[in-house]
Amino acid sequence: MLRKPSICLVLFFAFNLVRFSTFAQSYPIDLPDSWEKGEAIALFDGDDLNHWYTFIKDRGRDEDPKKVFQVEDGILTISGEEWGCITTINPYDNYILKTSFRWEGETYGDRKTKARDSGFLIHSKGKDGGYSGIWMHGIEVQIIEGGTGDFLVVGDGTETFGLSAPVAKELQGSSHLYEPSGDIKRINKGRINWYGRSPKWSDTIGFRGKKEVEKKMGKWNDLEIQTWEGNIAVFLNGKLVNFATNVKPEFGRIQVQSEGATIAFKEITLYPLIK
């Protein structure tokens, strides 16, 4: 559901990036009157994965003997035991994607003691497994302990994949930090961290920073991704945590990652935005 009263991020960026103050991190947004929210598409409705196919590293498409991806009692559980994803059969552009997720506790392999990790790869293009034999290339909205809402360009190193965002002057390690009043930075690889990511973040299971928006392990979190005309806004539990503009590509398939940790989803609903 779109929230009101509202401030339009499109207008902020069109008129003056400086006006987009730090208060915008917790503001709701709305879309211009020229946009309408279309009828909901239940990409996952609690019953099946008819809108998706599976892809697992070294196995390929629709080969899931270990049942990495399971639907039971209205919940989609992704075990993380093998690396891969579910991928939408159809590509999408200009939409609001809403879901609820929680960590289930289990971790596997070389991520056994590391931060629980997953994510949505949107605007995905190319061949299955084109990136490291696991995923299509795309723009990742990361779900990871301490870093949910980070953007990663999972691209091919060319201008085909990239995004721009206002960032802080100082890096967090080698990564940029989203800051609404910052200067615009363009990336074609690497990441833009969400505004509250701890500078002391470590790839350690259970990590939580001082500004954490994600709830503790086992609690349900609401994640909303809004994308329109090359913009992406990410909300975690009702708070705007990251924003990018001039995103390339502007459309593609949606992938949900299996990446070494068990994660559950209650719903995945897409609302087309119609102009």
Image (cartoon, helix red, strand yellow):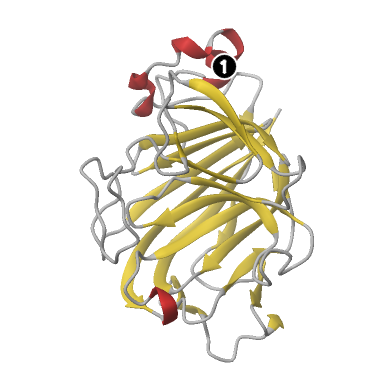
In the image: residue 171, left or right of residue 275: left
Residue 51 makes an appearance in the image? no
Residue ID at (58%, 20%):
10
Q: Which residue is mark 1?
A: 13
Residue ID at (57%, 16%):
13
Q: Locate residue 274, reporting x and y percent.
A: 69, 33
Q: Nearer the viewer, residue 58 or 73?
A: 58
What is the quadrant of the C terminus in the image? top right
Q: Amino acid at mark 1?
A: Phe
Disc 1 on helix, strand or loop?
helix
**Other-residue count near label 1 (Cα within 10 Å), few / some / many at <14 / 14–19 / ≥20:** few
Q: Locate residue 48, reporting x and y percent.
A: 57, 73
Q: Nearer the viewer, residue 16 or 156?
A: 156
Question: Which residue reaches farthest left?
Answer: 210
Q: Locate residue 208, reporting x and y percent.
A: 24, 53
In the image: residue 44, left or right of residue 173: right
Residue ID at (37%, 28%):
25
Q: Locate residue 157, reporting x and y percent.
A: 72, 48
